[in-house]
Image: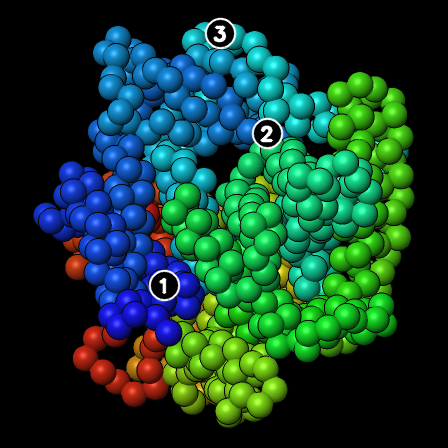
Amino acid sequence: MPETGKVNTDSSLPGIALSFLAGVCFLQLQPDLHSPLWTSSEIIMFFPLCLWLFYRLARYRILFALFTGYLWALLFAHVYLQHKLPQQLVGQDVIVEGEVKGLPDYSDKSVRFNFEVSHYLSVNGENNRLLKASMPSSLRLSWYYYKDEIQSGEHWRFQVRIKPPHGMQNPGGFDYEKWLYQQGIHATGYIRKSEENQKTHIADWGIDLIRQNLLTVLSKLPEPEFQGLLQALTIGHKSAINSQQWQVLRQTGTSHLMAISGLHIGLVAGLVFLMVRRFVPAFLCRHVSAPQVAALASLIVAGFYALLAGFSVPTQRAFIMLLVLMLAIFIKRPAFSLNTLSLALIAVLMINPVSALSAGFWLSFLAVLIIALVSGSRVAGQQTKIKAWLQGVRIQWLIALGMLPLSLILFQQGSLVSPLANMIVIPLVGIFVVPIALLASLMSLFSMEYSLWLFTQASELLSFVWALLAWFAQFPLSSWQPSSIPVGHSVLALFGVVLLLMPKGFPLRYSGLILLLPMLLFQYPRPQQGAFWVDVLDVGQGLSVLVQTKDKALLYDSGAKFSQRFDIGQRVVVPYLNYIGLQQLDILMISHRDNDHAGGADSVMQLMNVQQLLAQDEVVKEKSRANRPDKACDAGQSWIWNGVNFEILHAGRNNKKSNNRSCVLKVWNEHYSLLLPGDIEFKVEQNMLKHQAEKLTANVLLMPHHGSNTSSSKSWLAKLKPQLAIVSAAYKNRFGHPTARVMKRYHELGSRVLNTANSGMIQIKLPASPVAGIAEPLQYRKVSTHYWNHRF
């Protein structure tokens, strides 16, 4: 019996870990850190105090663990924000010196890389050496049309133009600003053409140079189809994986195979552990046990693998978890127990509390938690090989069950064939492909020829694995994509999964099924009869607008395509449609063929069920399909959906300029109207005033041509008199859109102007019945902001 008043800290370790995690997460939910109390000096003072109280007041350790987690994450956030780019330097030319970090990422027109700044030399040509401590120290730079190679570890002097971390903000889309924060990058920019751009020091020998050499070896593979996959599995470089391959991985629930994190590091470490444990020399066992030697050997190999992956944030997390597990084995404690998992959780968060923002963090710990729960409920005793295999199958299915709600919450997608696909593919990749790739990496230090031969064998094995995944992806129910799930439903679902995974005999175990129902039955809201909703997506310098009625949807334009690996249709538009649960687009309308409006159309048509395409003649001829009633835009075309009217007002086939051939669409109900004019210019505006003046009304107007001086004539605006004008433009775009002259015209009319560059996605809900003015638009950047987001 423990003494009275003493606390069994061992039994409360999971509670302490969860409380510490809760404190870290609470900080990540804050929209800003503007508080006179929380400066760096106060945090440094209060943090040791919390640690001391945690040690002294054992009864309140869970409470002080919460405060400690919050203050620790707050300290990290303040350190990052101290390197914020001063506003006066946004868009200015700066000369910097520093070192290339990590592997450069090459695309058709540019090379992108991380750059660690050692000195700021001048600003706008003035030799005023700036203090690095108060400036961004880590940059993400692009160098356009550079012909030579950039080597990791090289020292350069560059003339750059930088800006704060800024990304497109849309529900369901990739949060570029959060990713930059996780990587510790303080600003982004591009290298200007200048004589200042000079290499000052060649790359020193190091792990990044080894990784770069491996990238060169992998580029020589005879089967280029799997180069990107092997790069991801070997050195953690995933940029060469194409969109079709990512689609197959998502549909089969095997995207984690391409991340060097807990899965591969754990498999490699486990393989080494089993081999070394069996073949430990007898004389060593006089001093240490075979499992202890095996644990040390597995840590060494796993550390080498983590270094090959650049010791990125996911790799750090995986290695720390493995370190704690192997230390448990070394001191002869249970490896997969709640206490060991709790120690791993605390260690990961202490080293980098920003890890809690990563989806991989939650997936990794949930998978290990499931293993711990299942292993803990297993009947003790010697197992036969058949029973051990059946136990492994059971664990795999339970992991898949536990991951499904979290996958739906984090990615709005779950794979119903994931358990079977993972059960077959994980052993093939983890036991065969990855070890051969690691051996090839080691061989590259001695012989490039033998290294390439080994990589070729790994590629052959991967081709077999890929054939299996492609087969699984063809199943009708391979992927389930419901809409986004509310937070409350998500929490209930996670509690439900935990209950279902409890050991047999646990009270109310099967009530977890009831807790899953709200998530499974949830339907994303839609407009009422006669109403319509307008979503202007944040697509940078381009346009994409979704118009929804009660049971119909029209997408007007699809954003730009920047390269073979990146287009807005795939990265922004389709994820948002999945987020709101849209399975079908009744009409995809492409206003004109310019890239910033039509570039993402192919991805949208490939990934969504598009019933009809409306576009210019040449676009329809290029993209039409036999099983769809695609047609060219014509002035006068009209239709009615759920009491909402649609009409094409202009489709200038005879205009020479592509902008003036834009399909102009008007949408209206009994009380409100919307005008989508594409990129029309003065000429078309005046023609519409002359021939269609009675139809030129709009409560909401998409500013034509992104606010260019060639559009938005005074007479045209005077006729429209929009209450709300929306600009779809990129932050600090090189065209200067919207221009000051055009903005002045709208302000003189009394129109309210919103810009996606400042607001993120903008949603306007226009009801069927009249209300006093237009309801306040939803501005996604304002309602979902966090302290790391760019502020204006």
Query: Mark 2 near mark 3, Cβ–Cβ under 8 Å?
Result: no
**Placement of 590 over or under 534, stated as above or below:** above
Q: Which residue is mark 1?
A: 9
User: In the image, what residue occupies the spot 45% across and 32% down?
Assistant: 140
User: Which callout, 1 or 3, points to the residue nearer the camera?
Assistant: 1
Q: Which residue is mark 2?
A: 103
Q: CA gap, disc 2 to disc 3?
A: 19 Å
SS under mark 1? loop
**Placement of 419 over or under 155, stated as above or below:** below
Q: Which quarter of the figure has residue 460? A: top right
* Circle 2: residue type: Leu
For the question of whether residue 280 can be seen, the reply is yes
Structural crowding at the residue carrying mark 3, measured as other residues with C-alpha within 10 Å and reported as few (<14), some (14–19) or many (≥20): few
Q: Which quarter of the figure has residue 666? A: bottom left
Q: Position of residue 383 (x, y in %)?
A: 79, 71
Q: Position of residue 585 (x, y in %)?
A: 59, 72
Sequence-wise first label, 2 or 1: 1
* Circle 3: residue type: Thr
Q: CA gap, disc 2 to disc 1?
A: 44 Å
SS under mark 3? strand
